[in-house]
Image (spheres, rainbow, N blue to C red):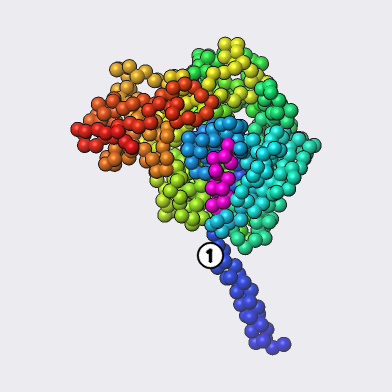
Amino acid sequence: MKLSTVVALSGLLAVSEAVPQQKLLQRQSDKKPNFLFVMTDDQDLQLNSTAYTPQILSRIKEKGTDFANHFVTTSLCCPSRVSLWTGRQAHNTNVTDVRPPWGGYPKFVAQGFNDDWFPVWFQNAGYNTYYTGKLMNAQSLSTYNKPFAKGFNGSDFLLDPHTYSYYNATYQRNHEPPKSYAGQHTTDVIADKSLGFLNDALESDRPFFLAVSPVAPHSNIEPGSMSSSDPTRMTEPIPLPRHQHLFQDVKLPRTPNFNPLNNTGASWVSKLALQNQSVVDAGDHFYRQRLRALQGVDELVDALITRLEESDEIDNTYIIFTSDNGFHIGQHRMPPGKTTGYEEDIRVPFFIRGPGIPEGQTVTSVSTHIDLVPTFFELAGVPLRDDFDGTPMPIKRKSAAVSHEHVTVEFWGSAVLEGDFAAIGVDGQTKLGNNTYKSARILGEGYNLYYSVWCNGDHELYDLTSDPYQTHNIYTPANTTTHLLGRPLHDVINRLDALLLVLQSCKGTTCIQPWKVIHPDESVQSLRDALTSQYDAFYQRQPKVSYEQCLDGYLISNEGPQVGLQYRDGLSWSAWV
């Protein structure tokens, strides 16, 4: 064969190989992005558990952006998850507990959300949607098909009362009957299921959203305990056998709020006894078991990302890692658990990598789980809904994100106590008082505050700049000598009361821009703006957040004044509507 012929043929071959590659690149640029969303259950950030998940750190956090001030708005599994997947605060979903009558899957269905929530919206936007693992509490052997959860091309849910049993889990796939996986570790089971759904997603020409929600590092609960009339026994998580020897010398961080010599907090927390050495040792063991249980999740994440790398979709996929709420062990003398408004329970990891996401970057602006669905919408190019209580996170360069410095944290009902010493109680009692509260976490330029109002009338105010572990409650409204942020303390408290009054029943944009409710002329857009002395008399006259009584759920009629004063022209004030 002549050399010229060889050259010509090789040129044609090069062109023929380039054409499919060009078409592939064009197809990728035209296609909407994919999403891989991994959410653990009850994972702490403040206790440093993420430092023990090297694959999650190296393959998501370091390859993308860490949102360092990301919070949940209700520190309990089911309310937090329903708020996440609807983009609404818990007071707007009224799913406020893990089981009926105040919460759980039946309440979610009764509120009409099964027809009107994220997977349905994303399917309508052209996405294939998949979910495996824990969706929400009280999705059970008796409720899973009343009706089936809508909006998924493929689903494989954990079902109560087996959800938290590491070696006796029951899953329910699509519309098939439930299947027991007794004898198999649930993290390995969900790893296989998530890889199967990822393969299904990669075989389609449609973009996909795959949510993977392993139960680790949640406490282990055996089915008999959850279904009995006695208090549910929640013991330490059970790691995979290959991880049970790890971290033998690791202990809980001995921070200033860990088993403090003097009582801290408010309400029932302020009455807890100092933990003895047996309780402290049990907490350290509980912590090590949580870290060990997370190793299977770390391997799961590694496997999913490796599979994406083997496909042609890794560069077109947003990969997100977070948890449904935080966790405490020993802080403020508390047994293991969540449900409080303290940092350990409301601050969670949030790492994201994907197209256009800067590598190795940390974002310090405030974000919450209420912002996640608006963020997914914006990243997918889907128009935002008017009924979102959140705003897109500042991920895209051209974003509709509205900067906010506050988080609305709310809870109703009893605290959740876990571990072998869960019945430690208060003053020798095994039953705690009601844990209902409304609070605001505020992170702005020059201030870092947490303010809460409990249903029993207790208040808390912490300046986390000088007191990052929340051990010194500075709430003293009658104090005329102490100053905070350059103003008398009582004047600052008056502003916080007015802000919380708006947030306690906010809807839509008022949840993100509450100061516009109080100051319609938009002269005040932050706590700093509101501290101007010309507003002192106005804020002093504002009604306060209060409760008629401590209830286990949300009734707006029980939660005191809902309407405050608006600042109009400095001379006339009026109630907002």
Q: Which corner quadrant of the image does residue 501 belong to?
A: top left
232 inside magenta stretch? no
Quick one: 485 or 168, which is closer to the camera?
168
Amino acid carrying mark 1 in the image: Asp
Assess disc 1: are there few (<14), some (14-19) or many (≥20) residues with their C-alpha within 10 Å of its C-alpha.
Answer: few
Height in image: 137 above or below 342? below
* Percent coordinates x, y for residue 449 in the rendering: 41, 29
Q: Is residue 389 left or right of residue 51?
A: left
Q: Residue furthest left?
A: 571
Q: Say which residue appears at 43% left-offset and 23% top-offset.
A: 547
Q: Which residue lies furthest to the right in this view?
A: 183
121 inside magenta stretch? yes
Q: Mark 1 points at which residue?
A: 30
Indicate the quadrant containing the N terminus: top left, top right, bottom left or bottom right. Answer: bottom right
Height in image: 261 above or below 34? above
Residue 557 seen in the figure: yes
Q: Is the magenta stretch mostly helix, strand or loop?
A: helix
Q: Residue furthest bottom?
A: 2
* Percent coordinates x, y for residue 213 in the rendering: 63, 42
Q: Which corner quadrant of the image does residue 25 belong to?
A: bottom right
Quick one: 36 or 129, which is closer to the camera?
129
* Percent coordinates x, y for residue 275 in the rendering: 60, 15
* Percent coordinates x, y for residue 478 in the rendering: 33, 17
Q: Say which residue appears at 60% left-offset and 51% top-offset.
A: 151
Q: Say which residue appears at 53% left-offset and 64% top-offset.
A: 29
Across the whole image, how many numbered discs are drawn on residues? 1
* Magenta-highlighted residues: 107-122
Q: Which corner quadrant of the image does residue 350 belong to?
A: top right
Residue 487 seen in the figure: no
Indicate the quadrant containing the C terminus: top left, top right, bottom left or bottom right. Answer: top left
Height in image: 571 above or below 423? below
